[in-house]
Image (cartoon, rainbow, N blue to C red):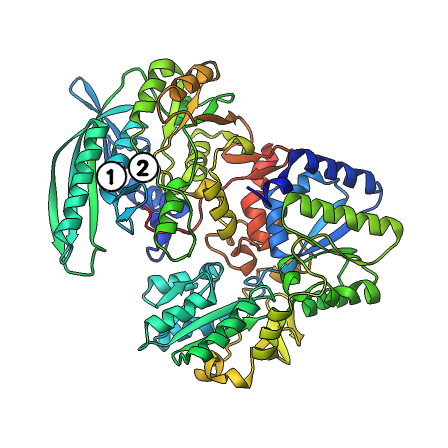
Amino acid sequence: MTAPTVRFRDAQIEMAHGAGGKASRRLVEGLLAPLFGGPLLGPLGDAALLEVGSARVALTADSFVVRPLRFPGGSIGELAVNGTVNDLAVSGAKPIALLVTLILEAGLSAEVLEVEIRAIAAAARRAGVTVVGGDTKVVEHGKADGMYITTAGLGVVDGRVQCSPASVRPGDQILLSGPIGDHGITILLARGDLDLEADLSSDTRPVYPLIERLIDAAAPGVRWMRDPTRGGVASALNELAADARVGVVLFEEKIPVRDPVRGACELLGLEPMHIANEGQFLAVLAPEFAEAGLAAVRAVPGGEGAVIIGEVRAEPARTVLAESAYGGRRVVDMLVGDPLPRIC
Amino acid sequence: MRYVDEFRDPKLIRQAAEEIGRLAEPGRTYRIMEVCGGHTHAIYRFALQDLLPPNIELIHGPGCPVCVLPMGRVDDGLSLARDRGVILTAFGDMMRVPGRTGSPLEHKARGSDVRMVYSPLDALKVAVDNPDREVVFFAIGFETTAPSTALTLRRARQLGVRNFSVFCNHVTIVPAIRAILDSPDMRVEAFIGPGHVSTVIGCRPYEFIARDYGKPLVTSGFEPLDVLQSIVMILRQLKDGRAEVENQYARVVPWEGNRPALKAMAETFELRPYFEWRGLGFISQSALRIRDAYAEWDAERRFSMPGVRVTDPKAAQCGEVLKGALRPHQCKLFGTECTPERPVGALMVSSEGACAAYFNYALRKTAAASA
C-alpha cells in the first residue's frame, strides 16, 4: 500500500476554502480525502453511504456559520435542519435522525437561543426527522458571532435508486427543482451593507418530499442528484462534469431566476448560477424517464417551478456550457473566490 | 426586467448579427477594439464572438481599471494596512489583485484590516464609525468612479472627518487610447467606445480619434444588442469611408457628459504629470491626483507613501495582451501558472480583464480540442 499523496499546496486558509467552489474542492480532494481515505470512504457525494448489517444508511455532517442569524424566510436553526436533511435526500435517502451541536458565545441572549431551538424543532418536525442528541459548547464573547451549529444526519437509503456519476450518460436530462439564487441574495441583502431592498426570501426547505415523488415516478432513471448550495448550480454541475467525465449543456433561457435575484446579480456583477440555494436540487434523469420525473416533481406543492435546464453530452468533456437563445455558447465555470462569505 | 430584457431579445440579436454578416466584406479583416473592460466581459459572457463572421476580430483594450494598476501601487496601499495599522477599504475588484506580498485578500487572511466596500461613501462611513482609527480608501477606476471619490472628498471636508484619506489611483481613458493609437504595433481600425466613462465625459473628448487618426468610434452600451448595434454602426462607417464619433448609448450617455460630475472632479483632482500603467508603461497626463485644497485627505501626502516600483513577473505578457498584440490564451502563463484563482497578471483578476473573461467563458484549448 502506498502512502497517501497530499496535493494541497495553498499556503494558508482563506474564506474561499469554505465557499464551495474551486478552493473548497482543492482542500477536500488534496488534503482531506487522501489522509482520511479508508475502505469506507467512497465517492465524494453529499453523504456517505454505508452498509450496516443488512441495512444501507446514509450519513452526513454539516455546519452552519451564517451571518446574520435570522434573515427573511428562515434562520440558522431552520437552515441547520434543512441543509442536513437535504444532503441525505439528494443521496437517495429518507432522513431519519439528527444530532445537533451548538457552539454558543458567552453573552448570547437566552431569547435568541430559544427562538433558534424552536426553529430547529419545528424544521425537524416538518422534515420528518427526530433530533436524537447533540452537544453544547460555550466560547468567549466575540468568538462565535452569537452561535454556530454543527449537525450529523442519518438516513435510510431508498433501494430503488442507484445514484452515481459513473451511471451518467450522454443524452441524460438535467432537472432543476425551481428558481435559483434566492438564499444567497437574501443573505447578502439582509446584511444591510448594500442599501438594496428586494421582495425576496430564502428558499430554505426540505427537498425530500419532491425527491420522494421523483423516485416513485422515475427511480431507475435517476442517475445523480445534488443540492446546489454554496458555489451554486454552476459548481455542482462542474463537479458532475468532472466526476462523470461528460459535458453539460444548459439552455440559458430555461434556467429560472427571479427578477430580484437577477437584478441584484446584474448590479453587483454576480452570476446567478454561482449563488447558493438552500431548497433546490438538481437531478440527472435518463431521457426516457425525464418527462415522468418532471411531472412528478411539479405535482408536489412547491415543485411547480421545476424545469429541465439542459442535458448531458459526451463532448466537450469536463465542461459546462450555457447556450443562449440566439446561439452563443459560453463556459460556465465553478465559483472562484468567495463573493458572499458565510451564507450558511 | 426592464432595460435589460429588451436588449437581450434573441430575435433582434439574430437580426443584428445577420446585418453584420451582410456588411462585413469577405476577404478583408476587421480589427475592432472594445476599449472598456465592461464590453470585454459582455462579449464573452454573451458569447457574442460566436455571432460574428470570422473576419471580425475584437481586440480587448485597456479599459479595466485593476488591470492597468501597477503592482507597486497595490503594495503601497497594502503597506498602509500592514505597517501603519490603517483600515484599508477597497472595491471588491481589488481584493484578489496580486501585489508582491500577496493580494488584499491574502493580507486580510493574515490579519491586516482590509475591508471591501461598494462605494467610497461607505469607506467614509467606516471612518466616522471608527474615530480612533485611520481609514484609507484605495481609489481606482476611470472617470466612471472618479466622481464618487470626488464627492466623498467633498463630504469628508464638509463633515470635518480627520481620520479619512484617499489613496488616489484614478486614471483617465483618453490618454490611454492615444497611447494605443501611437503605438507602432497598433493595427486597430475602429473603436467600440466606453459606455460608463462616457456617461461622465460625454463623446466630445473622442473627436480627435476620428479627426486626427481617421478611425471610427461608437460609444456603446453593454447589453448584447448594444454591442452588436455598435459593430453595425462601425461597419457602416467603414463601408462609407467615414470616420466619426457616434453614440449608440444615447439612452444613458449625453454628448456633453455629466457637468456636475465633471465639476466635482475638477474641484478635487488635477492631472498628474505622468503615471505608470501596467503593461503600457508611463503615460503623461493620464491620471488624477488630489488637489492641494484637499491635501489633508490625500493618503499619499498624509502617510508619505514610498511609491514603490515593482516590475511585473517576466513571463507574463500582460502588455502585449492589453495592446491587442496577443490574444489572452497566447500568453505563456495563461491557464497554467496564471488563473483567476491564482492570478499572476491583473488581466486575470477582474471579471473585466480580458484574460479572466476568456478563461471563464471561452471554450478553452482542452475543451475546444475535443469539441
The amino acid marked with disc number 2 is: Thr
Image x and y of residue B32, in percent: 74, 52
Q: Residues within 10 Å of mark 1 (few under 14, many from 20)?
A: many
Q: Image point 46% across, 55% down: which residue?
A: B342
- Nearest to the observer: residue B347 or residue B207: B207
Q: Are marks 1 and 2 in contact (CB under 8 Å)?
A: yes
Instruction: Single out the residue that lies furthest toward the right.
Output: B241
Residue B179 is left or right of residue B244, and the answer is left
Q: Which residue is mark 2?
A: A204
Q: Image point 42% across, 68% down: which residue?
A: B123
Image x and y of residue B307, in percent: 51, 79
Residue A309 against residue B138 in the figure, above or below? above
Q: In the picture, which quadrant includes the C terminus of chain A?
A: top left
Secondary structure of residue under mark 1: helix
Residue A234 in sight from this viewpoint? yes
Image x and y of residue B12, in percent: 70, 36
Residue A159 is left or right of residue A129, and the answer is right
Q: What numbered label is drawn on residue A78? A: 1
